[in-house]
Image (cartoon, rainbow, N blue to C red):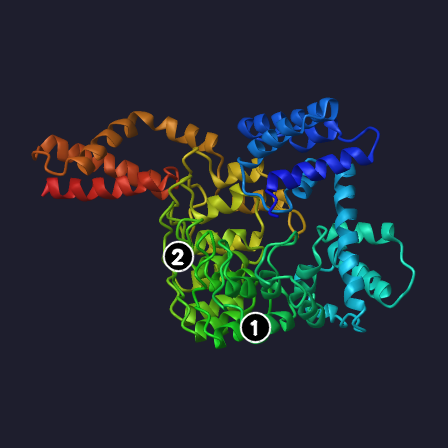
Amino acid sequence: MHISPAQEFVNDLKEYITSKKDNWFDRVKYEAALKGYVPNVLAYSNKFFDAIQSYIANKDEATLLASTTEYLSHGSYDSSQSYVWASHTDQEGFLDFLAMKRLQAFLTEVTNYSQTGKTLQEIDWQKFSSWGTGQYKQAAEKFYKGVKDYIDGKQISLSDLLQPYKMLNSIDIYNWAAAFGQVDLARFLQENNYKYDQKYDGGVPLDSAARSSDCGVLKLFVEEFKADVNYDDGQMSLLYNASLYGDEKGPDLLLKRGASPEGNLAKDGETPLMGATRNPDIKVATRLLGANANVNAGDWALGGFTPIMYAAMWGSEELMNLLISRGANLTHASQYNKTTPLHATVWNPSSKPAEILLGKQVQVDPIETQYGRTPLNLAVSIGLRSLDTVKAFVGAGANVNTTDKDGRTPLDYAYEVPVMQGHGFTAKDLQDFLISKGAKRSADLQTYVGAAAGRVGAATSYLMSFVYAPKLPVNTNLASTACVHSDTVKKMACCKVLANPHLQRLHDAGKKQAGSLSK
């Protein structure tokens, strides 16, 4: 019998509340966890939390079910909604209860599997680079060892297994087998009423297999169980998952079996090639390009970011050069806010992507339209990752006194926005470099410009007239005035006082019009 997500959530709550006498939920931790949430989210979250407290007092299950249904209607939830809620709201007691419940179900299936006489396959942990080298990977290794000891009949403590299991988000057994290359276990589960394309607590096993650094289970699903290589869970395709997380073996397997190189697109419009640049993996990208993946495809979420822009943010020098050699458009501007590949380089802790693009003679001061920032201004405003990137921009002729829509210069941000830590330079290093190149704060620029206001005010007015009214009747006095003021503006622009590139273009247009009027 099918149980709705809301009823399943209610069943978990009831079982947990019944298992304890008091101290079920912690309001202080709940409020701390949700601090900073937007008001509407906070409102329906608080309403749900209050409904749980009411149920504890009056045991009105019908009202709790209605409240849970309403709460779940505000978002996308699956069978793990109670676990996700406990985690997000920092309800440690409830989270431990749910994790232990899942662990016991996990070990029950392990017991069934062990009765076939098989054990777990050895794992080459060097393959699992995507798991990192920190606590997460340590937990994965510890949990694997505990499960293997359990199968081999050794005494284990459930409490010892619980903490590493929680670090793995209390994953279900089928997704765990798929993620860690346990082919025999995956086959056993599939033959015993599990489905590789069904959603469990850890997601869809087919997706987990595609994301794995060991494609053994993916091969099992595709070759033995005939899984659809173009399967799409509504958010990501198999090929995208394999390209984003794995090595070239997964994408190669899927492409040979007929997967589309565009991967049906991810939910946010990313293609597998974009995933490979985020990975980043040169072999995966090469394989995809060999299958005719579109090197200039645009995503949806970022308004038209292309693979070269993803590579500029996350990729390596080698990956950038590969995409360029295959025809990547280096002057592309996103549809949303005209962000260019050079803008994208500012998120990369390496200066190589910026240096490569500048070496191709791309424009050094393009302006994105959301905040009106050039790559230099953007780099400093978001918390600088690489001082060498700034040096590359300035060395290529970037205007150190450009102002954005907020009237802020790069030097303003150098004093106001902390640089990213751990990259080998300080905020003072950045400030000193910019100052040595003539950078000023906006207040200093305004003071300098203000001293010439008597001469510039009229010039601006006239120049605006020339730009927006090019058919203005010829007038000798007007022409001479425009020429004089255009020359004043030109001198100030050359001194980088008029840092705003819009005013520079204004000067250029005015000069051209004044020249035609004086003829």
Identify residue type, mark 2: Gly
Q: Which residue is mark 2?
A: 298
Disc 1 secondary structure class: loop
Disc 2 secondary structure class: loop
Q: Residue at x 49, y 75 (%)?
A: 257
Using the image, determine if residue 53 lies above or below residue 371: above
Visible in this render: residue 91?
A: no
Using the image, determine if residue 399 lies above or below residue 62: below
- Between 263 and 204, the residue placed more toward the observer is 204
- Location of residue 344 in the rendering, given as x and y in whole percent from the top left corner: 47, 53
- Location of residue 45 in the rendering, given as x and y in whole percent from the top left corner: 61, 30
Q: Residue at x 55, y 55 (%)?
A: 348
Q: Is residue 21 left or right of residue 428?
A: right
- Location of residue 418 in the rendering, given as x and y in whole percent from the top left corner: 61, 40
Residue 105 falls in image quadrant: bottom right
Identify residue type, mark 1: Glu
Residue 503 falls in image quadrant: top left
Q: Which residue is mark 1?
A: 248
- Location of residue 360 in the rendering, given as x and y in whole percent from the top left corner: 40, 64
Disc 1: CA contacts within 10 A as few (<14), some (14-19) or many (>=20): many
Q: Residue at x 45, y 45 (%)?
A: 400
